[in-house]
Image: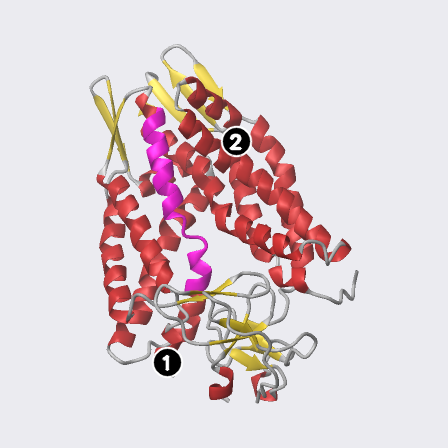
Amino acid sequence: MIEVRRVIGARVAGSRLETAFPKRSRPPVLGCATCGLVVNEGDPRQHNHGISLRCPRCGEVLDHEKPFSVQRTWAFTVAAAILYIPANILPVLSTTTAFRTTTHTLLGGIHELWIDGSWGLALIVFVASILVPVLKIGVLGLLSWTVRKAPHWRRLERARLYRLVDLVGHWSMLDVYVVVLLGACVRFGSFANAAPEPGILAFAAVVVLTLYAAHSFDPRLIWRDAVNDG
Amino acid sequence: MRSAEGSLAVCEGCDEVLRWTPLLPRETARCLRCGTVLGRGHRLDLAAVLALTLAALVVFLVAVFTDVIVVRLGGNAVATSVPGAVARAWYDGQHLVAVATAVTAIVAPALFILLRLYVLLPLAAGRLAPGFGACVRALHRVSRWNMVEVLTIGGLLSLVRLAALAQATPGPALFALGVLTLLFAAIETAGLRHLWRYVE
């Protein structure tokens, strides 16, 4: 049973929330990420499977921190950073016309769009294929590092960075879809042909790995005061 | 226990415990500490979400079973659908790329719609689907792998890049993907949290 002891702060205009408890007297409760139920941590009825607590309403695992969050984020981020090199060096697409075969890299494709005068599209592809992956790798590395080494540094900004990365992350799939569609559409035998090349494999792996990295990171760690295993 | 806890929320973004009052339509509740969105006032009721989901099912079938892009070059025409493009990538030896595309462009949107229908249809009839909790948990996981909006832009981008080479026209599936993007956005704003009110 939760006893609400003190409420600080009045209702903020435009927001219908208020901080329920003053600092350091946070009740022992867990929030369910799926159904939003607030569960009393001390209630032994919710204990099953030994140590893992499950939501009594929807069955979701309840915790204050995703398991091995920082380690997993590091692993996925480093793997993505390494694969980002072949993703940019190797060609992602090859086109064959009656005369010759040309290969295209990610940056080359953007360059071609730019030269063709579609600079708006070039910008979209640049953001999706270059900016978003680099931003994700950089930000997730920074977030994982600061959780341990600089826990108090610009917390609100770090929380916003995480939400930004989580929001834009899947847009890097754009070039993967374009290569898959072009490879399937341009099928005119020796006259004109397009096929995916190994670079797109590396790039797809970068996209999937950065998505896993973002899902592995737990934003609650940004706000954690006591770091026990620093 | 419920009455005391009903007004409390724990922020997903920072684990802060907050107290809240019911939201009006169009209102958004953000965590006071970290700014994470905790809830939105409902604009759509159960019937509206169900109607949108049924519409999404029809549009999704069009998006999957018709052609995305039709290319004409020297009297020949090549048309491709989304599953066709996935199969092509697989036969070209790009297995991981084919799987990633299939999961994010076909499987995840299909589950997004079908799991919702499985949960919502019995709920509209006043009953609870067997395995309700597991399905809603699965829906949460599936939503983040649904990338229909990116595929829509990818299809448009492919069209533009093809225009330099041959005569390329958009197929019905490309329009369907555009509509599906809007429908999914509308369904997502309704969220899943409010479903639990019907359970209790």
Residue B200 coordinates in the image, percent (x, y): 38, 84
Disc 2/disc 1 C-alpha distance (Å): 49 Å
Say which quarter of the image contains residue B135. bottom left
| Callout 2–callout 1 Cβ contact below 8 Å | no
Is residue B49 in view from this perspective? Answer: yes
Q: Is residue A107 left or right of residue A186?
A: right
Relative vertical location of residue A65 with respect to residue B103 in this rendering, above or below = below
Q: Which residue is mark 1?
A: B199
Which quarter shows the C terminus of chain A?
bottom right
Residue at the spot 41% in from the left edge and 38% down from the top edge: A177
Residue at the spot 57% in from the left edge and 77% down from the top edge: A20
Residues drawn in magenta: B139-161
Disc 1: CA contacts within 10 A as few (<14), some (14-19) or many (>=20): few
Label 1 marks which chain's residue?
Answer: B
Label 2 marks which chain's residue?
Answer: A
Residue B185 coordinates in the image, percent (x, y): 35, 54
Residue farthest along the top direction in this orientation: A99
Residue B70 coordinates in the image, percent (x, y): 25, 31
Q: Secondary structure at mark 2?
A: helix
Residue A198's tag is 2
Q: Is residue B145 part of the magenta span, yes or no?
A: yes
